Amino acid sequence: QVQLVESGGGLVQPGGSLRLSCAVSGSIFSINAMGWYRQAPGKERELVAVITSGGTTTNADSVKGRFTISRDNAKNTVYLQIYSLKPEDTAVYYCNADLRTNWRTTSVYWGQGTQVTVSS
């Protein structure tokens, strides 16, 4: 079984920073791309950032310059460093991973989400 466990969310004042982590565990053959998404109340889930196995990153325009995605392949962990938080960043943040549990099968797995609330 594969598990993705996010951590690092919480209540932050506007202008503050957070670092989210997502650790992948279980029967893993290899991990391809990893990403962060978020879903605000009443809105659809949206892509925040994605990082390939080689380290190439892509950020949503709305977070460029404030969010940085990175990964530690040795730890099967992806991070999201968030700076200059705004109230509109309030959402549940989800990580996902496109991975193989064997040489033939590729699937996308999701974490359970971590709440980020930006409020004074």
Image: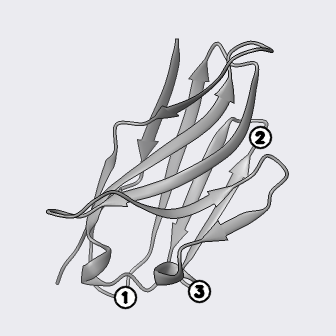
Q: Give the x, y percent position of residue 25.
A: 58, 23
Q: Give the x, y percent position of residue 112.
A: 34, 37
Question: Which residue does the numbered mark 1 point to in the structure image?
Answer: 15
Q: Nearer the viewer, mark 3 or mark 1?
A: 3
Which secondary structure lies at badge 3? loop
Q: Is residue 110 left or right of residue 67?
A: left
Q: Residue at x 41, y 53 (%)?
A: 8
**Numbered badge on residue 66:** none
- Give the CA distance from mark 3 to mark 2: 24 Å
Question: Which residue does the numbered mark 3 point to in the structure image?
Answer: 65
- Relative to 100, say whether 114 is above or below: below
Q: Mark 3 or mark 1: which comes first in sequence? A: 1
| Contact between labelled residues 1 and 3, with CB atoms less than 8 Å apart | no
Question: Which residue does the numbered mark 2 point to in the structure image?
Answer: 73
Q: Give the x, y percent position of residue 21.
A: 52, 49
The answer to whether residue 21 shows anywhere in this view is: yes
